[in-house]
Image (spheres, rainbow, N blue to C red):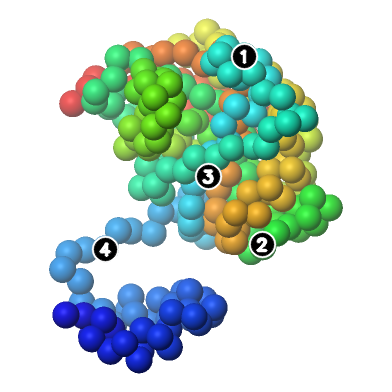
């Protein structure tokens, strides 16, 4: 029996302690340095930062669903902002893949889709952040690709099941270098994606249904946002499939570019 379970007095002491999670987080680095593990722990996932030698350590990956009207319509799920709130899903940081990578076509799908997105990097912790203060928590931005097993996602969606198999894909969260823009709220900027040089997506950040301030404020009602949290802000219309041999390229004005090559399935 666990020592904690064997000592009800300790369980009672810790259960109501509102600072337990915070104290655990503070103690975690010391534990990591002194503990012996059964196998090698996961690495710290990180991204390059433009103009800096230091890398940005990634904490969590959040994604905003249906955040461009035209994309929501093409997916058969129009959005009425007057009665709806943003919705989110997440992926494991281990799915993070750098721009320029070559990745295998994933298993168990015949309809693998690209989704070009603006990625927001949180730089300052916050909880229940107001829209007016949202800029204070921004570190920077990047170009991102939310790669998707569309066939599996749609089956899950239509059956009311979680999207994990459709979205949380190995090597499926592609991100370019982080561009530091502390306190900057991007309100517009052309966004585009091409496959083998042929343009497939073309839109503008000003077409976001929920803008940067609104996303930060709303998501922070559910989570204590932390430095290194990445928020993929949604994709415009024009999503579509890729096959082995395809090269995906994308860009966002004022932010940068991204590239991914699809190799044959394993």
Q: Are marks 2 and 3 in contact (CB under 8 Å)?
A: no
Query: Where does label 1 land, which residue?
Result: 73
Query: Where does label 3 land, which residue?
Result: 62
- Local crowd at mark 3 within 10 Å, few (<14), some, or many (≥20)? some
First reached walking from the N terminus: tag 4 or tag 3: 4
Q: Are marks 4 and 3 in contact (CB under 8 Å)?
A: no
Left or right: 188 as drawn, with respect to 265: right
Query: Where does label 2 land, which residue?
Result: 127
Residue 187, relative to residue 196: is it above or below?
below
Residue 94, relative to residue 111: is it above or below?
below
Q: Position of residue 40 (x, y in %)?
A: 21, 63
Query: Where does label 4 land, which residue?
Result: 41
For the residues labelled 4 and 2, the Cα–Cα distance comes to 29 Å
Is residue 80 visible from the viewing direction of this image? Answer: yes
Q: Position of residue 170 (x, y in %)?
A: 32, 37
Nearer to us: label 2 or label 3: 2
First reached walking from the N terminus: tag 3 or tag 1: 3
First reached walking from the N terminus: tag 2 or tag 3: 3
Q: Nearer the viewer, residue 235 or 157?
A: 157
Q: Are marks 3 and 1 in contact (CB under 8 Å)?
A: no
Q: Position of residue 233 (x, y in %)?
A: 62, 36
For the residues labelled 2 and 3, the Cα–Cα distance comes to 15 Å
Q: Quadrant of residue 171?
A: top left
Nearer to us: label 1 or label 4: 1
């Amino acid at each position: 029996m666990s020592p904690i379970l064997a000592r009800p007095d300790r369980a009672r002491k810790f259960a109501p302690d509102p600072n337990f999670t915070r104290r655990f987080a503070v103690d975690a680095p010391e534990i990591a340095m002194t503990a012996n593990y059964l196998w090698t722990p996961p690495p710290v996932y990180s991204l390059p930062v433009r103009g800096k030698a230091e890398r940005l350590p990634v904490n969590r990956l959040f994604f905003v669903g249906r955040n461009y009207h035209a994309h929501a319509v093409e997916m058969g799920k129009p959005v009425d902002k007057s009665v709806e709130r943003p919705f989110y899903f997440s992926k494991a940081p281990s799915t993070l893949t750098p721009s320029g990578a070559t990745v295998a076509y994933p298993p168990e799908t015949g309809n693998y889709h690209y989704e070009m997105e603006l990625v927001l990097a949180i730089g300052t912790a916050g909880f229940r952040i107001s829209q007016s203060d949202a800029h204070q928590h921004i570190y920077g931005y990047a170009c991102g690709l939310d790669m998707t097993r569309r066939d599996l996602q749609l089956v899950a969606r239509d059956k009311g099941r979680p999207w994990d198999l459709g979205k949380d894909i190995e090597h499926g969260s592609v991100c370019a270098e982080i561009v530091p823009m502390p306190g900057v709220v991007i309100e517009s900027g052309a966004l585009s994606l091409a496959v083998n040089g042929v343009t497939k997506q073309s839109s503008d950040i000003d077409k976001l249904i929920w803008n940067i301030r609104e996303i930060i404020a709303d998501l922070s009602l559910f989570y204590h946002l932390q430095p290194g949290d990445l928020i993929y802000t949604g994709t415009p219309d024009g999503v579509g499939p890729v096959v082995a041999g395809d090269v995906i390229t994308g860009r966002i004005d004022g932010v940068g570019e991204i590239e991914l090559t699809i190799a044959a399935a394993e």
